Amino acid sequence: MSASSYSTHKDQLCLKVAVPLPVRETFHYAVPGELREKVKVGCRVRVDFRSREVDGYVLEEQPAGRRENLKEILKVLDPEPVFHDSLVPFLTWMADYYLCPIGLLIRSVLPSALSQRVYKTARITEKGEKASGLLPADSEERKWLIWVKENPGRKIPFSAGKARSFEREGWIVVDEKRGSRRAGPLMRKFVRPHDRDGLKALLKEKRQSFKAANEFQFLETLSNSRGIPLKDLLSRFSNGAYLVRKWKDRGFLETYTAPVPRNLDGGSLFPPPAPFDLYEQQERVLSAIERGLDRRVFMSYLLHGITGSGKTEVYCRAIEYAIRQGRKAILMVPEIALAVYMEGIFRSRIGDRIAMYHSGLSEGERYDQWMRIARGEVDLVVGARSALFAPFQNLGLIIVDEEHDLSYKQEEAPRYQARDAAVVRGKLEKAVVLLGSGTPSVQSFYNAHTGRYTLLSMPDRVEKRPMPEVRIVDMKKFSGAGEKDEIISPVLKTALDNVLASGKQAMLFLNRRGFHRIYLCRSCGRSLRCPNCDLALIYHLKQNRLVCHYCGFYQELRSDCPSCGSLGLKPYGFGTERLEEILQALYPDRCIARMDRDSTRKKHQTFQMLKKFSRREVDILVGTQMITKGYDFPNVTLVGVIGADFSLGFPDFRAGERTFQLLSQVAGRAGRGDQRGQVIVQTFNPDHYAIAAAKEHDYHGFFEKEKELREQLGYPPFSFMACLRLQGNNKKRTAEMAGWVARTMSSLLKSWPKRGKEIHVLGPVEAPLSKIRGKYRWQIFVRSRKTWLLHAFLERVENVCEKKLNQAGVQLVIDIDPYQML
Ligand SMILES: [Zn+2]
Ligand SMILES: [Zn+2]
């Protein structure tokens, strides 16, 4: 449609725009005539919002109708949309469900290269100058005022709250500045023939008459190309700069700039396995998925396939099928290293129409990958949870591998569960969603149980390889036998000796999860638990007592165990570093390596470490849960679990589930080759149902028991939960506000006669990690059997509390379906 057809007022278009600020609403803007052709849904536009310039996102074009006096957008920032209208319903749902302002959500979802940094700077006033002279010499205020005086226009190093209070005093004036764009397309200068035929003719006629020795070669190379990066020419021809200038001046060559994709190191970790014939169970599962794809409606499947049952091959074929239908696919995996591994496999199968998307990429790489997806240049995206937002049109299939993995929960704003959200995206875009796991989350399996998901299962290992033998070692026997035996039992030591002697490899797993200490009875193996919630109590150093983080119950420290009466209660704790040291002392001439968050900070370290391990350059690999993820190491015949009690002692209603999953995943690492693997689990709780079920590889037994316990205590999936976290710089005020919010919540519920009783508020309680990065933390848990009720209530609470909390300098963070109880 031409621009002129909009000319009458009646037909005027307006845009629905989301702004990246903490506001729930979207806003309408008019489009000036000259921008009509440029603006599209999914473009960023600069708008005047509450008298400042803000870059918003176009969500919808609508007739302006009766809306009058709309402000006009100032500028269209993108020559092409950065997402499509098909993604808008999903983004809207995300914002509503996870209570996140939609503009902020979109900003965090887009590659960060697309958002310009806005930062605050300050200038000192006359009053401020005076104040800085009068304030006590050692006061913080004085220090900052002097900083402002000396650094006008620089980004302020103190908090926005402090800046506001200085501004209220009239000491400073705060300004906002816009940073430069951090990354965009990588632009390169190219050279190409301006007149190819002319150039060819010239080469034929005047072959002998070129002066420089390589001039003929230079022109011939160019005459055969569509364009060569200038940089390449300069490195191949030492006089390249001169030659380019000379032949450009004569009209035979021309230069131009064009975007180039950044080089991605997409090498595969191990040679990808050649496709083999499918096993019967794979055929069956695949044909169910293909039938779903054929119907072109939303379908959700839970694939319960034990480790080693051949899930990856099913994923491959399902993705190939969707691509053959002309549709797009997303494959989500829990770890970046696993994404790199999977990408290697898929690149060998489907070629270059594949993109990687995860936080391990540089800003520029993320931008390039995102834009390739948005332009429709790829068919498959492989990535971690952020791949969920891949701006595809015509999405056909979303696969969430290892769907039970905790890394799908994003713990920073926007807080969302990528696996659950994937199901919603599939529903909104009529795609098939396949969740796969060897140990499905209780939540997903329950959904399959109640018919929300279709259950598919692959109960056998490929080639019918036997499941590894799992041995449980009761560590109570070695209590007091000295640190070495308490960490590596004689049973495990003997097994390690044998493995190393036969030239095989071992993995030792220790799940410390940031907790240094749990309180554990060395006689009976129980940890202290809350009588109301059945959660492990957490030691709070300052008050020197044990607290239930969930309901607030606490008790003094004691050494006598309430379960068995012995004086065996003691703190228990050590980390992967200590384990590595002990192993090195036991096996001085062996290569021991450690893989945890500390040892793999850098982007490629994890990858390098796994490569070394797969090349058998490492004998024993020690690690946290990072090493449990789906890699295939055929030479590993022994897996040891060092402190199974660490995950059982976690203050979380999912502790049993996590323990079962971890043990099963770890066990799956053993015996992937020809030899049957062995797993040794060291624990003080050999009879715990999660450990006993993992020993028997009995998922169903575990699920039934877990379901029963959750139902009794009203935990999810039998309820919906939210965690309200209050954080502030002032300890006393944060505590007071937590109390006030909880009281406000209770009185809101009392004034809601019918529904109030269906919502339960627990707390406030000081968070187990009571101070993080200088912020004091309290939490309040809310739960209800009805998700809409919970949401309506939380929105009320937020509205009622917002103003007072802002004034008090305390931040309220709402975490829907929380996983993190710390
Ligand atoms: Zn005891
Ligand atoms: Zn409790």
Image: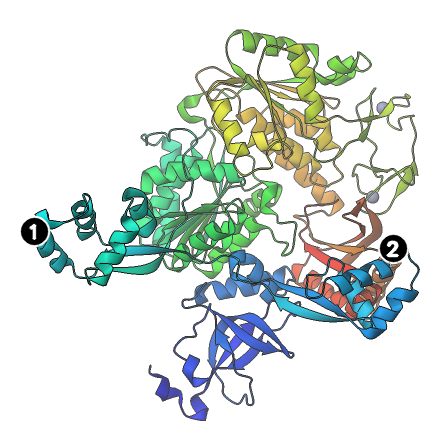
| Nearer-the-camera pick, 637 or 335 | 335
User: Is residue 753 visible to the viewer in this orientation of the structure?
Assistant: no
Q: Amino acid at mark 2?
A: Ala
Residue shown at 83% from the left, 52% from the top: 763
Against 645, is 59 above or below?
below
Q: Position of residue 314 (x, y in %)?
A: 39, 38
Image quarter (top left, top right, bottom left or bottom right) of the N terminus: bottom left
Badge 2 element? helix
Label of residue 204 in the image: 1
Residue 338 percent coordinates (x, y): 49, 37
SS assignment at label 1: helix
Which numbered disc, 2 or 1, marks the residue that appears first in the sequence? 1
Q: Residue furthest left?
A: 205
Please determine whether, in this image, residue 12 is positioned above or below residue 459: below
Image quarter in which the C terminus is found: top right
Give residue 107's mark. none
Q: Position of residue 381 (x, y in %)?
A: 42, 48
Depicted 213 relative to depicted 66: above or below: above
Q: Of 687 and 543, which appears nearest the observer?
A: 543
Which residue is painted at 17% across and 52% down in the image?
A: 223
Above or below, 185 against 704 in this view is below
- Which of the numbered marks, if any, corresponds to residue 735? 2
Rendered residue at 32%/43% (across/down)? 235
Q: Nearer the viewer, residue 79 or 281?
A: 79
- Residue 127 at x, y = what percent? 85, 73
Question: Between marks 2 and 1, how big is the CA–CA gap?
Answer: 86 Å
Amino acid at circle 1 = Lys
Quadrant assignment for ligand 2: top right
* Image-quadrant location for residue 782: bottom right
The answer to whether the residue labelled 2 contacts the one labelled 1, judged by CB atoms less than 8 Å apart, is no
